Amino acid sequence: MSKYIYDDLMKWVNDAQIVQAITEQNSVTSGLTEAEVIAKDNAWRAEVGSSSTPMIDAVLNAPLSTFLREHQGQSGGRITEVFVMDHHGLNVASSGVTSDYWQGDEAKFKQTYNKGAGSVFVDEIDLDESTQTYQGQVSFAVTDPATGDVIGAITVGLNASAFF
């Protein structure tokens, strides 16, 4: 799994498309309060499993989500999910529906975005609620190459059984 992380994932997790999409969303969400972030997360959670999903659809239909699904499809079953987060930890794009919209209160975000450029966090293998597979999540800080500033994060779910 470590070899795959460093030989494959590291080649595209800071792709220009990812940086651009995060930068665009950061400009929209820059003034949000924590209460507004939590309200957005609650709205997302209410849409999960519902017939009306405008908030989820906006993320899943983002051009970057197509890019993420392409990388997932090319992984030979190793990638179970991919999602990109802005500076609050809010979803920017995703290969599939996540159980929540706000990742900013979770280790995947705190151990990357808050730790600075080059940060990588590999979480324990666990049964993932949204993909229903045993996976390990690896998260990376996403850095703006022009400034060197961390602007968001990306999490890639890896199918644990694909590496044994």
Image (cartoon, rainbow, N blue to C red):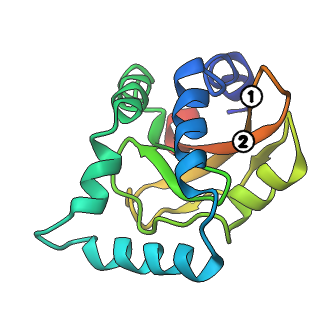
Q: Tag 1's secondary structure?
A: loop
Residue type at tag 2: Ile
Tag of residue 96: none
142 vs 7: above or below: below
Q: Do callouts 1 and 2 mark residues in contact (Cβ within 8 Å)? A: yes
Q: Classify 11 as above or below 104.
A: above
Q: Position of residue 2 (x, y in %)?
A: 74, 31
Position of the C terminus, as image quadrant, is top right
Q: Amino acid under label 1?
A: Asp
Residue 164 visible within the image: no
- Give the answer, above or below, for where 51 lies relative to 57: below
Which one is nearer the viewer's eye here, 159 or 11? 11
- Write down the residue under mark 1: 144
Please indicate, yes or no, whether residue 55 appears anywhere in the rendered image.
Answer: yes
Q: Residues within 10 Å of mark 2 (few under 14, many from 20)?
A: many
Q: Around disc 1, counting alpha carbons within 10 Å, would you say few (fewer than 14), some (14 to 19), or many (20 or more)? A: many
Of marks 1 and 2, which one's residue comes earlier in the chain?
Answer: 1
Q: Which residue is mark 2?
A: 151
Q: Please give left or right for residue 78 compared with residue 16 in the image.
A: left
Q: Toward which corner of the image does residue 142 lie, by quadrant? A: top right
